[in-house]
Image (cartoon, grey):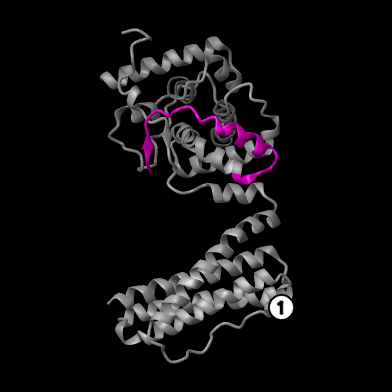
Amino acid sequence: MTDHDPIPGLDRLATEIAPGRDLFADIERRVQSPLAALTRALRVRVGLSLATAAAALGLFLWMPQPPPAPPTVAHADPAALGDPALAEALATYRQAGAALQKALEARREDIPDPVWRDVAQSLRDIDAQLEQIEAALAQDPADPRLLSFAFAAHQQRVAVLGRLVQTFSRS
Amino acid sequence: MSMALRSRPPPPVLDDAVRAAQRGDVESFETLYRAHVGRIYAFCLRSCGDVHRAENLTQDTFVRAYKHLGAFKGDSALSTWLFSIALNLIRDDYRKAKGDISLDDTAEPAAPRHREMNAAIDLERAIARLPQKARMVFLLHDVHGLTHQQIAAGLDITDGTSKAQLSRARALLRERLTA
């Protein structure tokens, strides 16, 4: 056997392997200035927020109107955020979250107790995060990291509620 | 984790992406990342045998590439340039872990900890058991198509040493695959 004999299996060896997770988000965060990263992220997130809010509000309007539920999160003053687009995007998330929460509460008796307890705990955790973030934002409305955290927490809240409302609307 | 068979050459549109990324356009850099990440990650994963370290090395490769993209003149393929960055990072990683790679290093590394790769593939296992230097030369030359000259430059060795390491790697692989 010589050095030029083919290696068994070499022609079938993958030259490309996709990572198990998307690595680019971290790369982007590391190569961009925080402000530039936020600007780009916001372009995506504001678009997503509007789409999510539209879907959530559409679902809410389609469903029977539930009794009102009190808001659970103390919000920073949107006007203090300075940028009207940011304030509007955050307000849209709040409205979508509140609408979904009302819709979910209207389905309370259809939701098994263990699921409801988990949901309530998840929402309490998210709301506790949001309270801290919003309080910090009230002190420093232009901090890009705080804004980023606020959007992430609102997205998480809307996502949790949205999935549940959809699930229990089908049953 | 998904695998793809041998890659096609990147499309010409990537040249535009390189130029735009050199001007700081992150979306264009993402295009380059998507086009090359599979090969770079495959090389890192097979070199170090650890998913977490391979992910970090891949990310470090692209972060360094972005920061130094202005220095890329197109004398070689972008993939070759990226491999040279990854190679340097892998060497640094080895140095931190075990000291520099020695040409006399005959110790076999531990079997890869990752289970995502198909352990039934005899060749993958045999490659993972190659000595570090021979493994890198084999991967770069026989799997990713770099020349001995390019490998020698990346590893600070001579062309002849690169050829000798490749020959050694092939012999070990044949021996293990036919045993």
Residue assigned mark 1: A79
Residue found at x 45% / y 16%: B166
The numbered mark 1 sits on a residue in which chain? A
- Which quadrant is home to the C terminus of chain B? top left
- Between B43 and A84, the one lying in front of the other is A84
Q: Position of residue A165 (x, y in %)?
A: 38, 76
Does residue B29 appear to the left or right of B116 in the view shown? right
Q: In which quarter of the image is residue A66?
A: bottom left
Residue found at x 53% / y 86%: A71
Residue found at x 47% / y 16%: B165
Q: Which amino acid does label 1 sit on?
A: Ala
Query: Helix, strand, or loop for circle 1?
Result: helix
Q: Label 1: few (<14), some or many (≥20) within 10 Å? A: few
- Which quadrant is home to the N terminus of chain B? top left
* Magenta-colored span: B1-27
Q: Where is residue B80 in the image (x, y as percent from the top left)?
A: 56, 25
